[in-house]
Image (cartoon, rainbow, N blue to C red):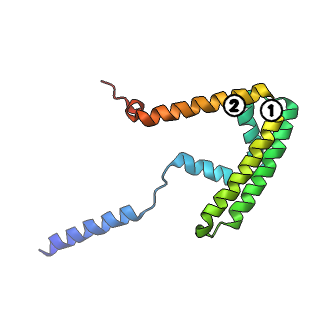
Amino acid sequence: MKNIILIATDLVVTNLSMTAQEKPKDPAQRKARMEKQQSTVEQRAQKNVNQLNAEVKLTQEQQVKVKELAIVRIKKADEIRAKYKDQPESKEVAKKELESVRKEFKTGVKAVLTNEQIQILKEKKKANKDAKDAAKQNPEELFEVAD
């Protein structure tokens, strides 16, 4: 009888210790977050420029201007995040401040882009939105089972 109780207790303790260990939710997200924290403001701004350049083919002059705007946005966003870091009750206030910084950045970028480039971005945004909406309506299509 003692052996059965001992084995059952051992199983419960083992199970609890295994579930108590925190596992990373998504290794790719964790790695991206760590790289973001380790990269400099200029590197993060250059990444923004590269992403935009891949979509609309920026000129050298546009790349410089967009990078300057991105550096300003990143610095402001980092300041806001640092300001509200240990204040979970102020999360909504921080979100609103970050949203205003994002809008300011988007406005600045639109001023740098040509009308054709803005149109390309709008079309890509619409295509992405349509794809998301379609995925929400038919989630089974994302996970088609091969017969």
- Give the vertical position of 81 relative to 47 (above or below): below
Q: Earlier in the sequence, mark 1 or mark 2?
A: 1
Residue 57 seen in the figure:
no
Tell whether 59 sits left or right of 52.
right
- Give the vertical position of 74 relative to 136 (above or below): below
Q: Residue at x 50, y 49 (%)?
A: 26
Tell whether 12 sits left or right of 45.
left
The three-letter amino acid code for the residue at tag 2 is Leu
Query: Which residue, as the protein is rendered here, is positioned at the far left?
Result: 1
**Residue density around tag 1, few if under 14, some if 14–19, many if 20 or more, within 10 Å:** some
| Relative image position of residue 6 (x, y in whole percent) | 21, 72
Disc 1 designates what residue? 113
Q: Residue at x 40, y 35 (%)?
A: 139
Disc 2 designates what residue? 121
| Relative image position of residue 72 (x, y in whole percent) | 81, 51
| Relative image position of residue 34 (x, y in whole percent) | 63, 53
The three-letter amino acid code for the residue at tag 1 is Leu
Element type at mark 2? helix
Query: Which residue, as the protein is rendered here, is positioned at the far bottom?
Result: 2
CA gap between label 1 and label 2 equals: 10 Å
Which image quarter holds the N terminus? bottom left
Q: Residue at x 37, y 62 (%)?
A: 19
Element type at mark 1? loop
